[in-house]
């Protein structure tokens, strides 16, 4: 039995989880309790964002694909903002995540690359839609002769 994914809901929940983590890092959290959790979440977000990107980019026949790509793009952008603020010591300074910074830099670069790929996919899709909506000269002749 095939399983149908509801990308819109999955991306929404992921976006909200990233947003919650982003806001949580404004607080002076105790590293004893939250350091491992925050790092685990960052790794999870990275893996899931990339998996969703691969799924959406490889299947052109998915319903609502352009909309889901846009939602995914927003989630990726928020995730990259989170990583940038961590790397620039703007957030999460109460946690000792410095040992993971090289890993986070790689995640950030990968997500930025996928954001560019999503923009290209959306551009191609919009150009294809525009071409599909054009009426050829033969179609005009047929319409005017009728």
Image (cartoon, grey):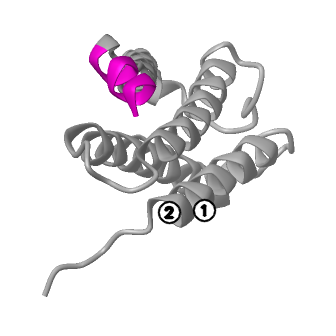
Residue 96 left/right relative to 68: right
Which residue position is annotated with label 2?
10
Any part of residue 34 in sight? yes
Give the mark count.
Answer: 2
Q: Quadrant of residue 2?
A: bottom left
Q: Quadrant of the N terminus?
A: bottom left
Q: Name the one closer to the observer, 105 or 65.
A: 65
Residue 98 left/right relative to 74: left
Q: Could you tell me which residue is drawn at 47 percent across and 22 percent down?
A: 101
Residue 18 in the image: above or below residue 81: below
Q: Could you tell me which residue is drawn at 77 percent across and 20 percent down?
A: 90
Which residue position is annotated with label 1?
13
Disc 2 on helix, strand or loop? helix
Single out the residue that lies furthest toward the left.
Answer: 1
Q: Name the one closer to the observer, 107 or 65.
A: 65
Give percent across and percent down for residue 14: 56, 55
Q: Are marks 1 and 2 in contact (CB under 8 Å)?
A: yes
Magenta region includes residue 50: no
Q: Name the one closer to the observer, 11 or 101.
A: 11
Q: Quadrant of the C terminus?
A: top left
Magenta-tinted stretch:
138-146
Q: Main secondary structure of the magenta part?
A: helix
């Amino acid at each position: 039995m095939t399983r149908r994914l509801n990308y819109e809901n999955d991306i929404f929940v992921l976006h909200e989880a990233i947003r919650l983590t982003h806001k949580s890092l404004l607080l002076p959290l105790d590293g004893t309790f939250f350091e491992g959790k925050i790092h685990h979440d960052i790794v999870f977000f990275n893996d899931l964002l990339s998996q969703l990107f691969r799924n959406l980019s490889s299947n052109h026949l998915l319903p609502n694909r352009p909309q889901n790509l846009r939602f995914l793009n927003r989630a990726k952008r928020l995730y990259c903002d989170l990583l940038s603020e961590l790397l620039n010591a703007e957030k999460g300074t109460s946690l000792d995540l410095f040992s993971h910074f090289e890993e986070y830099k790689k995640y950030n670069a990968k997500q930025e690359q996928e954001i560019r790929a999503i923009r290209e996919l959306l551009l191609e899709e919009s150009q294809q839609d525009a071409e599909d909506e054009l009426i050829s000269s033969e179609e005009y002749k047929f319409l005017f002769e009728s």
